[in-house]
Image (cartoon, helix red, strand yellow):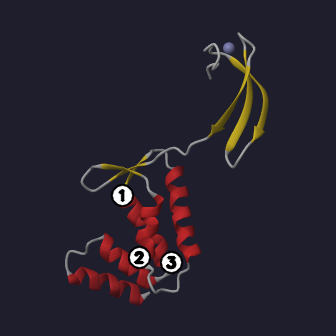
Amino acid sequence: MKCPYCNYKETKVVDKREANEGTTRRRRECLKCNKRFTTYEKVENIDLSIIKKDNTRQEFNRSKIEKGITRACEKRPVSYDQVKKIVDEIEAELRLKKTKEIKSREIGELVMKKLKKLDKIAYIRFASVYREFADISSFEEELKKLIKK
Ligand SMILES: [Zn+2]
């Protein structure tokens, strides 16, 4: 943290307190000119990269996942809170991984795993879009597996 007055590199923190959510306000004093200034520091989430099927990269985007799930849950007895919870869980799982590069496939699989427990119809809808079932028979196969359970 450079002093805004003299550009000296070393400062000491003379006061520290939580400002808004996730932001820390620090009162600093320059070790050279002794002038004081205030900083607001915020911890940023580490950005995850999503690697798509065609190997292009995209920034991790919560709302995209949320949209996909919401679409699959349309007219199903699934609340917005439930959708949000799934997205939270998925994000938490991804952030626990050692790698910051996630294959879009992995996310799709996670969504499917969660939807399967929540609502079978939503699961099938999501899976049919996501897996792009090559033909109707593989789709029916999946349906049969679900009905048996
Ligand atoms: Zn200074």
Question: What is the C-alpha distance between the residues marked 3 and 2?
Answer: 17 Å
Q: Position of residue 126 (x, y in %)?
A: 37, 75
Task: Provide the residue designation for mark 2.
Answer: 71
Bin the neighbour count of mark 3 within 10 Å (Cα to Cα): few under 14, some 14-19, many 20 and up. few
Q: Which residue is mark 1?
A: 104
Q: Is residue 112 visible?
A: no
Q: Is mark 2 within 8 Å of ligand 1?
A: no
Lower sequence index among marks 1 and 2: 2
Q: Amino acid at mark 3?
A: Lys
At x 25%, y 75%, the residue is 133
Question: Is residue 105 placed above or below 84 in the rendered structure?
Answer: above
Residue 3 percent across, percent down from the top left: 64, 18
| Residue occupied by mark 3 | 117
Query: In the displayed image of the protein, which residue is found farthest to the front?
Result: 5
Q: Residue at x 57, y 68 (%)?
A: 85
CA neighbours of label 2 inside 10 A, class few (<14), some (14 to 19), many (20+): some
Q: Secondary structure at mark 1?
A: helix
- Counting residues from the start of the chain, the first of labels 3 and 2 encountered is 2
Whichever of callouts 3 and 1 sits on the residue coming sooner in the sequence is 1
Whether residue 6 appears in this view of the structure is: yes
Mark 1 packing: few (<14 Cα in 10 Å), some, or many (20+)? Answer: some
Asked whether 30 or 113 is in front, the reply is 30
In the rendered view, would you say 120 is above or below 111?
A: below
Q: Label 2 near label 1: C-beta < 8 Å?
A: no
Judged from this view, the residue extending furthest toward the right is 15
